[in-house]
Image: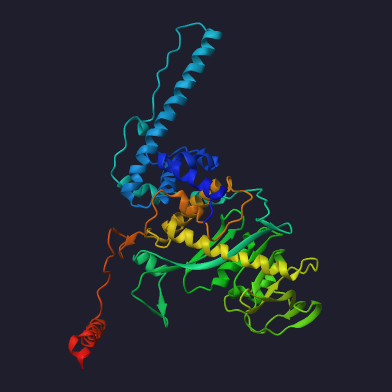
Amino acid sequence: MKQNRSLAISTIIQEQQKLNILNLLESNFPEEILKRKMPEKSRNRVFSPVSTLLTMVLTATQEDKSLKNSVALYYGLHQKIREKTYEEALLKIKEHEKEAREKPKAGRPWKKTVTLPRSKEQDISLNTAAYSKARTRLPLKMTTELFKASHMKGVKTSYSHWHNRRIFIGDGTYIQMQDTPALRDKYKVLHNGVAQEGYPQGLLVAIIERGTGQVSGFALSDRHKSELALFYDLIDKLPKGSIAYLDDLYNCYEILAKCIRQGIDIIVPAKRKRNYQMVKKISDNDEIIEIKKPVKRSPWLKKEDDTQDKIRVRRIKCKSSKGKEYTLLSTVLDEGISADEFQIQYLTRWDIEIGIREIKTIMDVNILRSKTPEMILKELNVSLATYNLIRQIIYEGIKEMPFSPKEDFIQKFYTINKNILIDKKGRVYARWSPGRRRTKGSDQEANVTKTQTRKKLSPENETR
């Protein structure tokens, strides 16, 4: 792979991360979160909501996401906060003394010594109980605000826009959770309507902005809810005048119709056959068609949601580099845009696969560690917000450079990038855990297979 400017920037980030990861994130961390005021009746705790949130962000960048490591990270953060608080208090005293000298008042001179809050006077304990309770107390709304504040604004490059349309790419994936009663109840796995003994699993649908790589929105549900239903609600969060690149699953009349109503364009492949009426032929492989509303509504669609009786889309026949023919549908009806542009643009939909891979493997969201539904959402909000902050750091160095699947920018951010081995209880091991015991039936099958293999490989059979 050729060395280029983006990889050089990523290498610099990697070197800086070895020194102090907080220095990187602090400059991009949303100020409105850091300046958040404590409620009047709240206690002056060691783990305040802001410090708890900062610790969760730092933990999201680590390979070891245990509570013990989180508290160790906050120990260093606590030292830094204490020094900063002391310097701010000392500066106020000096300013007051200077004012007293310039405008002296009657009476004894005012003397003041620097006093720190009790929560910052001494070193914190490395016991994890306080941090564990602080994560539970942290308002879910605060993590949601952090995720929203992590989005970059006013980004416009040759790769983030297409004909003045902001480009978004969406897709879904499954994530695994811890085996707790609360999560099993909400995110249970069913087979033929019967709950299984496997781990609880969730369906995560994410929308990523092309050009920055940031996650602009996401939705989480149990794995048995329709992915289309989740994306149908996420359409409301897409800005008007933008365009979304999706896979064939989203080639659904209700999705197309709602995007048109919301002023959002869309490009999807059309693998399934659909009845339509041609309205205008632009070229041999390019035409505008009209699709009527199907009689049978999608089961996930709400009764109060109304769709148009018919919609108009553009139907483009394409051919891959290997000669395979396929069709694209798009709500962009501008005839000034050639059919070739649609094909070239849709090839970049692969960026979402890279983004989801980075989120699941490098940010390690493939297995969530929280044990309650509310903490699951907090963990996702913080992890995706941290991913956005890292993407923001990288974007500042590669503004005009397209994101390529061959270049793992996020991977360069981390000093250590190893596979984490986790057993069914979420414990980290140096070697793979054997997991659940096999059933007697599978043990017998395994023994039979081994016996047959030995017979085939024995010298006696070879001579025969």
Q: Residue furthest left?
A: 460
Asked whether, in this view, residue 348 is left or right of residue 379, the answer is right
Give the quadrant of residue 336: bottom right
The one nearer the camera, 393 or 122, is 393
The one nearer the camera, 205 or 284, is 284
Q: How many badges with numbers are in the image?
A: 0
Could you tell me residue 348's position as x and y percent?
61, 64
Which residue is painted at 47% across and 37% down in the image? 40
Which residue is painted at 76% across and 68% down in the image? 338
Q: In which quarter of the image is the C terminus?
A: bottom left
How is the protein colored in the picture?
rainbow
Q: Which residue lies furthest to the top in this view?
A: 106
Q: Residue furthest bottom?
A: 464
Give the quadrant of residue 345: bottom right
Residue 68 vs 438, above or below: the answer is above
Could you tell me residue 49's position as x and y percent?
44, 43
Could you tell me residue 215's position as x and y percent?
55, 57
The one nearer the camera, 104 or 419, is 419
Could you tell me residue 209's position as x and y percent?
60, 57
Residue 230 visible in this rendered orientation of the protein: yes
Asked whether, in this view, residue 33 is left or right of residue 315, the answer is left
Residue 1 vs 75, above or below: the answer is below
Residue 39 visible in this rendered orientation of the protein: no
